[in-house]
Image (cartoon, coloured by chain):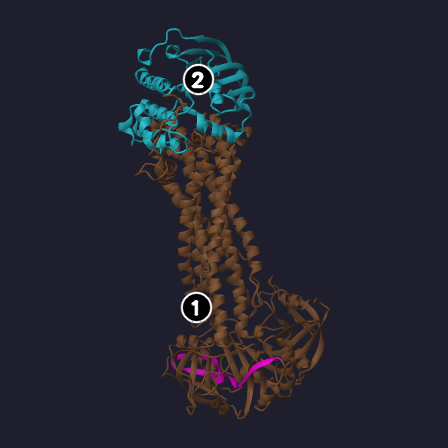
């Protein structure tokens, strides 16, 4: 039988052996490296889960918001007025561009709740009896709408009802127009208009101390002497109409009746908060997960490259027997794909579950009736594509490197690695270092790039941790500055209308009030060119003791006697600088329009504000010396009496205790932040573990012969462990400070990107956070080092020496 | 009778780097190998035997000179052509077996037959080397001699035109070495495969049709073996 004659051969694939030998090799190699593969799977899983959960929760919230607004007919615009006749409705309906219009009676009230001794305020909004309002409809969670002929029935906003455990059948006392009324709760509901239920005097929701209620129109009309009249309208726009023209026309019509300026949905308090929050969320949901995925992909690349280079000889044999470079690439590509797809699939599932949980968390904060959780295919595809793409790039590069050598050279044992004398030897201080220590240093110096990549991997995990943990430091700082230095009052009292300064003396005379400091808020529209912004100019007395202006460098800022002092963000919105003139259109009283100079710019944590000397603000409003409210410093022993006394005063519309506000703030923000921090810490820990474990395992594979030789020569397990793990320890110790610096830089950039109009987040990094991040990295590293250490004990001393060098 | 030339080299030269050292492995080799013959390349360590065989097998590239396999110029072939050449025409047996550790004996043979154009079955190949009863064993479960026989089965399963063996008994004791050489002898005899065996062991040269002596990268002598012995009769 000669080579040239064709032997009649049987088909290659025999029955019972369907899988190719190369695929069997792949599966067995995968099983052989299962520890490392699992570590990589967890790294990918972390990256993908973070991305999928945050992105899908963001998509879900936005989708839910959009559908909720549509389904429950959230208005496009709103306007308040002192008192206007119902007849005006026809004129308003004739405005070009306007769609549906609905008039309402709305009133702020103080409430008394049995068993709750603190001041509670609320807003009563009128609804047609026995029917839903045309706009801003109510989702009834429990109970029913108010019925005709039942004048004391109310529907309560759900968060408020939940906070106090109120249900249909319970009652609540309101002080309406100076008179106590017992209101009967018939339903619990939600409305898109009050998605975020925030007291106008506050900046964060506090459902314990502020609630919204819906009451029959005729009851409210009767209570506030508004028969045949209204003090609030909501409207939609006709398709294609612009909001500005409609607002101008409405303002013209309502001005004689004390119109306070119509505004669009963008400026509606709840919507404004929601959109700001969503914008911030979107940035967080985009930046953080992509960083995670990037780190996971980068790690994957390094680990796969090193794994493939360890198989250099086997690759050479395959090439020797005629496997093409492409075949080799496909072989390792399959191995890597199994790992990556497992990680991506598991990460997607976990991400979905996490997303649902995060959604539930957000539901407590954003009061939708339901959350439509969506996981869009593009989200899953992006996550999978990123990780698979990175993995395959890594495989291609590694295989190309491995096949660059002719097979003969690759099968030849690698020449002894080139080592050189290290820095310590060049400095002449080697006598202070043992031989094993010098081995560690030489190995580090021999392949500095490899060491650098490992250090970068671990420091990335550390940096991610910092990005998650710094939030609490920043928020703590803002609270300390804002409420410790700037806002030092115990109580903020708000009046229904600008009131004479005599009210301050009355407040000062209350038992337990140590100091009362007036403030004046003038609602106005600020204009500069085509740019405008609606806000309340805060009039502050000279030399305030309680409510001071503090900039972000913690320096007190004095209020100029004339002109506006505006925050940096507002200056950017209006495109003005010091010395520029701003047109101020006052929206109360005589409604003057004046040109006012910008006296200065202040940098604060609170996002958008305009300040003026109180006397100057009063001159601007043209109502004489008036106050809008007061800041009080009180003796806590008299808290109850002061609350009762203030609650009964008909001109007092809001009583806010600062410590409760801080508490509410912490409750809402802290909950979400804590969850994010936990997730990020866990995943960063997984990534650290993955990097360290894989690095250690690969080092062990690369050097097992060398280490076994040392054991044969008489080195103890501990000494050999020192050589292997010592190198790793040096890299970990170097990576922590690098990671802290990288994390600080990334977090500073991140904090800057999270600015909203409500507040700016300063970048603050506490020592505790640095320690915490370092400890997590060290802990994860120690755990993986311990695992690898156990493998050292299983070194086959004889077997390794039998194979050739 | 004009014999069919399978390999022809002209001025074949190879210089390679070992770390920081330059090694002149081959210094202008002129050689011809014929179809069906069993050739032993004999020389001391460092004489250039492995380098020559690696270049003949398309595992390595020459620094200068030419190599032809039949009418194919190997020195001008790119990686893809060399890979195809090895896939179709060359079987290798290495000193340290180079089996894939995660595959069984049968699978180590199958990994080659699955990409060959006209192979025999892996079972047939193992049968040729008397290892059918160990087909499901992993390399770690086989002795050195058994591993080498699996490597031979792997090399011949594709029915290659040439079989290149680099010190096939170098890691084995003499008794096992004889068994391995017998397998090679049988393949050469029954399949007619041109077989090249590298060795530094002069005794093994006695089984060859021709012996080519190499020293310091040069061919110093080529002898026809008038008294060819069978592998079974060799002792060292």
Of residue A640 and residue A454, the one placed in the foreground of this image is A454
The brown one among the chains is: A
Question: The C terminus of chain A is located in which quarter?
Answer: top left
Host chain of mark 2: B
The answer to if A734 sits in the magenta stretch is no
Secondary structure under tag 2 reads loop
Percent position of residue A715, x then y: 37, 29
Position of residue A736 measured from the top left corner of the image (x, y, whole percent): 49, 46
Which chain is mark 1 on? A
Q: Which residues are magenta?
A: A97-126
Q: Eyeballing the image, is B193 above or below A571?
A: above
Where residue B223 sits, quadrant-wise, is: top left
Q: Residue at x 43, y 73 (%)?
A: A369
Q: Main secondary structure of the magenta part?
A: strand
Q: Horizontal placement of A170 versus A176: left or right?
A: left
What is the C-alpha distance between the residues marked 2 and 1? 79 Å
Q: Which mark is residue A106?
A: none
Q: Is residue A160 above or below residue A146?
A: above
Query: In the image as oriented, which residue stretches furthest toward the left?
Result: B133
Q: Is residue A196 visible?
A: no
Relative image position of residue A711 (x, y in whole percent): 36, 28
| Circle count | 2
- Say which colour chain B has: cyan
Q: Which residue is mark 1?
A: A371
Residue A111 is one of the magenta-drawn residues: yes
Decide: is B214 above or below A8.
above
Q: Nearer the viewer, residue A19 or A171?
A: A19
Pointer 2 residue: B35
The answer to whether residue A9 of the structure is visible from this angle is yes
Using a 10 Å C-alpha cutoff, classify the residue at mark 2 as few (fewer than 14 neighbours), some (14 to 19) or many (20 or more). some
Which quadrant of the rendered structure holds the N terminus of chain A?
top left
């Amino acid at each position: 039988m000669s080579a040239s004659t064709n032997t009649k051969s049987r088909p290659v694939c025999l029955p019972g052996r369907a899988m190719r030998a190369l695929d069997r090799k792949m599966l067995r190699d995968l099983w052989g490296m299962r520890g490392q593969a699992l570590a990589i799977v967890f790294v990918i899983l972390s990256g993908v889960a973070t991305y999928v959960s945050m992105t899908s929760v963001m998509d879900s919230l936005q989708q839910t918001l959009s559908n909720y607004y549509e389904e429950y007919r959230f208005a496009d615009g709103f306007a308040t007025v002192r008192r206007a006749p119902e007849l005006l409705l026809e004129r308003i309906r004739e405005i070009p561009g306007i769609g549906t219009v609905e008039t309402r009676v709305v009133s702020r009230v103080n409430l008394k709740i049995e068993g709750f001794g603190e001041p509670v305020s609320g807003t009563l909004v009128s609804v047609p009896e026995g029917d839903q309002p045309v706009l801003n409809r109510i989702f009834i969670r429990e109970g029913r709408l108010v019925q005709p002929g039942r004048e004391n029935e109310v529907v309560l906003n759900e968060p408020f009802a939940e906070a106090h455990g109120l249900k249909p059948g319970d009652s609540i006392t309101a002080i309406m127009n100076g008179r106590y009324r017992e209101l009967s709760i018939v339903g619990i509901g939600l409305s898109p208009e009050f998605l975020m239920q925030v007291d106008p005097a506050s900046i964060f929701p506090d459902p314990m101390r502020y609630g919204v209620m819906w009451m029959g129109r005729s009851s409210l009309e009767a209570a506030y002497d508004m028969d045949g009249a209204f003090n609030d309208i909501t409207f939609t726009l006709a398709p294609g109409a612009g909001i500005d023209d409609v607002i101008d026309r409405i303002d013209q019509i309502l001005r004689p009746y004390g119109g306070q300026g119509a505004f669009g949905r963008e400026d509606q308090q709840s919507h404004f908060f929601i959109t700001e929050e969503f914008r911030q969320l979107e940035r967080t949901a985009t930046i953080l997960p992509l960083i995670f995925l990037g780190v996971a992909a980068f790690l994957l690349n390094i680990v796969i490259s090193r794994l493939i280079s360890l198989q250099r000889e086997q690759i050479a044999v395959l090439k020797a027997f005629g496997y093409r470079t492409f075949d080799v690439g496909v072989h390792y590509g399959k191995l890597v794909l199994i790992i990556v797809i497992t990680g991506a699939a598991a990460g997607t599932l976990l991400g979905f579950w996490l997303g649902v949980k995060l959604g539930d968390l957000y539901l407590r904060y954003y009061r939708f009736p339901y959350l439509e959780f969506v996981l869009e295919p593009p989200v899953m595809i992006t996550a999978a594509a990123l990780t698979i793409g990175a993995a395959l790039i890594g495989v291609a590069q590694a295989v190309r490197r491995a096949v660059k050598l002719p097979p003969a050279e690759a099968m030849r044992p690698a020449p002894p690695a080139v080592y050189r004398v290290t820095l310590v030897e060049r400095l002449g201080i080697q006598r202070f270092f043992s031989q094993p220590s010098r081995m560690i240093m030489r190995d580090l110096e021999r392949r500095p790039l490899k060491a650098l990549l490992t250090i970068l991997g671990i420091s990335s995990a550390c940096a991610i941790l910092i990005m998650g943990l710094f939030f609490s430091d920043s928020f703590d700082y803002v609270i300390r500055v804002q409420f410790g230095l700037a806002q030092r009052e115990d109580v903020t009292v708000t009046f229904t209308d600008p009131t004479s300064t005599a009210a301050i003396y009355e407040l000062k005379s209350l038992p337990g009030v140590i100091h009362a400091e007036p403030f004046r808020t003038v609602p106005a529209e600020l204009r500069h060119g085509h740019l405008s912004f609606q806000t309340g100019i805060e009039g502050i007395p000279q030399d305030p003791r309680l409510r001071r202006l503090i900039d972000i460098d913690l320096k007190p800022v004095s209020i100029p006697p004339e002109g506006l002092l505006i925050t940096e963000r507002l200056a950017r919105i209006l495109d003005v600088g010091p010395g520029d003139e701003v047109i101020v259109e006052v929206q109360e009283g005589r409604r003057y329009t004046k040109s006012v100079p910008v006296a200065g710019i202040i940098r604060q944590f609170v996002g958008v504000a305009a300040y003026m000397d109180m006397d100057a603000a009063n001159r601007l409003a043209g109502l004489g010396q008036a106050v809008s409210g007061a800041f009080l410093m009180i003796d806590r022993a008299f808290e109850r009496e002061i609350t009762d006394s203030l609650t009964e005063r008909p001109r007092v519309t809001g009583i806010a205790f600062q410590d409760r506000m801080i508490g509410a703030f912490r409750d809402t923000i802290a909950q979400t932040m804590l969850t994010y921090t936990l997730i990020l810490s866990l995943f960063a820990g997984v990534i650290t573990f993955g990097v360290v474990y894989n690095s250690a395992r690969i080092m062990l594979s690369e050097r097992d012969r060398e280490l076994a030789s040392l054991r044969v020569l008489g080195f103890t397990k501990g000494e050999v462990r020192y050589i292997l793990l010592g190198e790793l320890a040096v890299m970990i110790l170097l990576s922590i400070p690098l990671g802290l610096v990288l994390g600080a830089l990334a977090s500073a950039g991140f904090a800057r990107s999270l600015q909203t109009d409500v507040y700016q987040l300063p970048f603050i990094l506490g020592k505790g956070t640095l320690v915490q991040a370092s400890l997590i990295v060290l802990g994860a590293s120690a755990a993986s080092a311990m695992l690898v250490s156990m493998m050292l004990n299983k070194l086959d001393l004889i077997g390794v020496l039998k194979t050739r060098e | 009778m004009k014999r069919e030339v399978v390999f022809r080299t002209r001025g074949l030269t190879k210089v390679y780097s070992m770390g920081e050292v330059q090694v002149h492995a081959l210094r202008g080799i002129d050689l011809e190998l014929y179809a069906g013959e069993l050739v032993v390349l004999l020389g001391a360590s460092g004489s250039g035997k492995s380098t020559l065989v690696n270049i003949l097998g398309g595992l390595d590239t020459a620094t200068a000179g030419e190599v032809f396999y039949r009418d194919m110029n190997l020195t001008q072939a790119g990686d893809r052509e060399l890979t195809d050449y090895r896939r179709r025409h060359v079987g290798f047996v290495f000193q340290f077996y180079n089996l894939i550790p995660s595959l069984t004996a049968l699978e180590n043979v199958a990994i080659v037959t699955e990409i060959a154009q006209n192979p025999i079955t892996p079972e047939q190949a193992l049968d040729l080397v008397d290892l059918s009863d160990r087909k499901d064993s992993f390399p770690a479960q086989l002795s050195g001699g058994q591993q080498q026989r699996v490597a031979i089965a792997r090399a011949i399963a594709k029915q290659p035109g040439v079989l290149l063996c680099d010190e096939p008994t170098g890691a084995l004791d003499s008794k096992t070495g004889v068994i391995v050489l017998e397998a090679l002898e049988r393949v050469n005899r029954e399949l007619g495969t041109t077989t090249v065996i590298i060795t530094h062991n002069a005794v093994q040269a006695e089984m060859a049709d021709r012996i080519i002596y190499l020293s310091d990268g040069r061919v110093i002598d080529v002898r026809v073996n008038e008294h060819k012995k069978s592998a079974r009769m060799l002792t060292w």
